[in-house]
Amino acid sequence: MSTPAAGSVPVATDAPAVELHGITKRFPGVVANRDIDIVVQPGTVHAIVGENGAGKSTLMKILYGMQRPDEGRISVNGEPVSFSSPADAISAGIGMVHQHFMLADNFTVLENVVLGAEPGRLGVLDFAAARRRIREISAAYGLDIRPERMVEDLGVGDRQRVEILKVLYRGARILILDEPTAVLVPQEVDELFGNLRELKAEGLTVLFISHKLDEVLAVADEITVIRRGTTVATVRPADVTARRLAELMVGSDLPSPETRESTVRDEVVLAVEGVTVRAEDGRTLIADVSLTIHSGEVLGIAGVEGNGQAELVEAIMGLRPAESGRVLLSGRDLTGMHTRPRRTAGIGFIPEDRTRQGLLLEATLWENRILGHQTEPPNVSGIWIDRAGARRDCERIVEEYDVRTPNIEVAASALSGGNQQKLIVGREMSSRLSLLVAAHPTRGVDVGAQAAIWDHLRAARAEGLAVLLISADLDELIGLSDSIKVILRGRLVADADPKTVTPEELGSAMTGAGDHRGGPEPSDVDEATADWPASAADGASVGSVGPAGSVGPVGPVGPAGPAAGGAVDEPADPLGGRHREPGGGT
Amino acid sequence: MRSRFDTERILLALAAPTLAVLVAALLSSVALLVAGHSPLSTFQSMASFGVDSGSIVQILNKSITYYLSGLAVAIGFRMNLFNIGVDGQYRIAAFFAAVAGGAVALPAPLHVLLIILVAAVVGALWAAIAGVLKVTRGVSEVISTIMLNFIAGGIVAYLLNPDRLAVRQGSQLINTHPLRQSGWFPGIPLPGGEVYGFIVVAALCGVGYTVLLNRTRFGYDLRATGLSETAAVASGVDVRRMVVRTMLISGGVAGLVGLPTLLGESHSYGQDFPLGYGFTGIAIALLGRNNPIGIGLGALLWSFLEQSSQILDLEGVPKEIVTIMQGVTVLSVVIAYELVRRFSLVQQQRRVGAELGTAAPTGDEVPA
């Protein structure tokens, strides 16, 4: 494993900058990391990729001393280490640039950088020395930062460089960057990559955490893929494509959630007709989305996170107003209705973020049994809460859905994420539903529980439940769905047949192309979708992802084209000029 | 298993107030020592004066008012609404109730009922202004209720004029037209004097609060909104409507705050009608942790301190020491409860984890 990238300075020592062996970290009821093995060569950019919830952030917290592993060894520059706090990690030369900046706006760059590591003697700050060092560091790594500037005047990219400078100032030789591009626009991403190459050229080591494959391929020397808490592969970007990486990330050898025999009936349960949703600042979040789900049908929505799935769910649940279009449940127009009447009309909801939307963390389990079902037995009778009924039914859910808890009087926050999820699934499936909106129903759940949740979904589907399934797990999507639609930049751009489609085909449809690199993030919904004519019929704009890998009309996606992601037969951005700075919306 | 959690819960529930009272006593002692007085003898004389039969009636009467005020604030607190405007709400409510009650002659129960009704409705409507502003214009209820306090004060001062809704009594005092006796709330005689009969209404309010919050759908929605607005919204709670309704109820209870005095003692609203009960209510809701019994205890403690402070002047100890005690008590209660709350959450997590940790699937994950 020599340093692969051309132009990087060979390093003096042969010892890896960071070595993680057999790292395992358990949380109550769930294993966050298991047998993690990573070797990071000095003077390289090493990317760690994985789905949300795969265990990347836990791993980085372990490396940065914020959490202690239950098992395993960590070595830095060949020396075994044991961190009990970030201070230990810093003194070992490890620095972390958090996704969310930690800067005081009303301080200058200089003040921010020295904050917490103030130079000087006897309580007198030696700003001159600090200013000199900041200038040196800035020049040495091409960061282009003037210490006198106020942070509030800086843009996002500048602020990130200040964060990087901050850790360099504290003597870091190994930098951890946690999803550094999440907040950047494409030009800033390019600048950041330039900075990273400078750092590498100076012999520093960068650990780059991301789930954006194009970026990883563009900047990393080596890529380690994490799936379900463990390292599944370490590859060189030259040897893989984005497709292959996606495949590694989602895994194609998992227990299959197959549901083969079709239970789809004629009766349409959910009809979404031409729904457009805009953000408050006018950006289009979803554009002219139409879909129908029949009784007994699972419709899967595939897409890279941030392409409008969440907004589609919110529009259906009445959590976000649609600008135009209609939502009908079994022929009944729900448009403009509030969430509660929609739920009582027979929509169940497994939200994407269980702690924010699915649970009252400080309330007991049986009180959480009531949440979202405050109008129906066994939780209520008339205007009264039926405490006995809710308790009884909560006991039943705990039993049937194998929620691991000592009793139902504990607070929901005491449960592990997987058990919280089982409680939510059990609760939503316990009502008489005609439609279930399930966003990532098995996220963060161990495999056994995942299979159980799949079984419950399948059983309900066989009884005629219609399901809108959003999932980042492509196997789950393909295995459970009766039909799949691909969402990209706020529009449904392709249909796929789960009987024939492969995760790779789906993955490339999701990114709008095959394996092009260095293109813009697909998450800037606004560009492609600004004001398409609402008349575009569902079928006309939708391509198909075929078994032979032909990606239908989804193909023509240039990295910078304004109509990127649109199908060929669509007019290009008829109103023009509605482009906004991308990157702010997701 | 369940009983183990329950015992622990009770222990923790007792730990917080005990801790808080100890800390408060300690800090007050320090303040006394600094001022050059013996804490022990000061506490002793306060205690002995406080249990005097005359004092007990005073304490009870004060705490009825404080209890209602605390409840009014607590209703808002339960859904993270800060109704700082109880003060203005009860004053304007008591004023209009006094005007309405003074203007009519009705049989006794109806007369009292009318006054209570007017007070509750006026208080509710006044509070609703802040609620409507919040949901339509996004105005923080903290700001609007504070400002509405001043407006209420101004309106009452304007109307409390012999040319308008008031009458002159004697040379100095201006009152609303006094209530006929049919509009008085009969008191309960005790050895040390008469306790306001309104204590019954206050107790009913406490029961109503418990039932409303813990047993009804509306109460569930309210508490859910307070615990997590995002989860409440996703569950179908119309938060805007909840804000207005909660302000209505909070204001309705706030409207009753002035009635123990009005119906049991003053029988008219005059320039000397007491001010500031609304702010005391905030402290008492904090002391009582929004719990109806806790609020009752808090109200009693508060009025006990106020009443027993009267002896301090005679002992040569500045009365203001009691204000320090009250402040310190509120602070230590708030801090102690927060500490205990966090501690018990972590304990629960640890307990659940310990019990289930071994059962956690470790080996049956994915064959990579």
Image (cartoon, coloured by chain):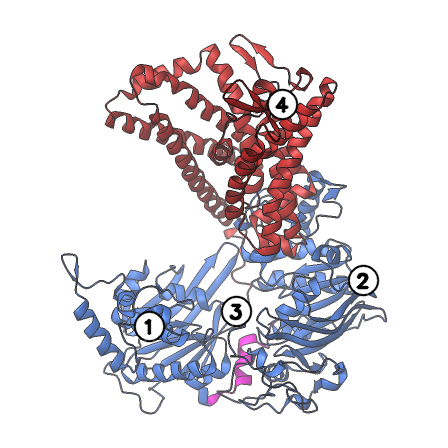
Chain colours: A blue, B red
User: Which comes sooner in the sequence, label 3 or label 1?
Assistant: 3
Chain ID for label 1?
A
SS type, badge 2: loop
Measured Cα–Cα span from mark 2 to mark 1: 57 Å
Residue A308 or residue A513, whichever sits in front: A308
Mark 3 or mark 2: which is in front? 3
SS type, badge 3: loop
Mark 3 or mark 4: which is in front? 4
Main SS type for the magenta part? helix
Chain ID for label 2?
A
Q: Circle 1 sits on which residue? A: A162
Where in the figure is residue B34, as x and y percent of width and height? Answer: 24, 28
Mark 1 and mark 4 in contact? Answer it, CB < 8 Å.
Answer: no
Q: Circle 4 sits on which residue? A: B177
Measured Cα–Cα span from mark 3 to mark 4: 70 Å
Residue B334 included in the magenta stretch of the image: no
Q: Do labels 2 and 1 share a chain?
A: yes
Q: What residue type is labelled 3?
A: Asn
Chain ID for label 4?
B
Going by the picture, which residue comes out furthest to the left? A122
Q: Which amino acid does label 4 sit on?
A: His
SS type, badge 4: loop
Residue A254 or residue A562, whichever sits in front: A562
Q: Circle 3 sits on which residue? A: A52
Picture quadrant of residue A561: bottom right
- Is A39 rendered above or below residue B113? below
User: Which comes sooner in the sequence, label 3 or label 2?
Assistant: 3
- Is A191 rendered above or below residue A75? below
Q: What residue type is labelled 2?
A: Glu
Chain ID for label 3?
A
Residue A463: image tag: 2
Q: Give the range drawn in magenta.
A: A239-254
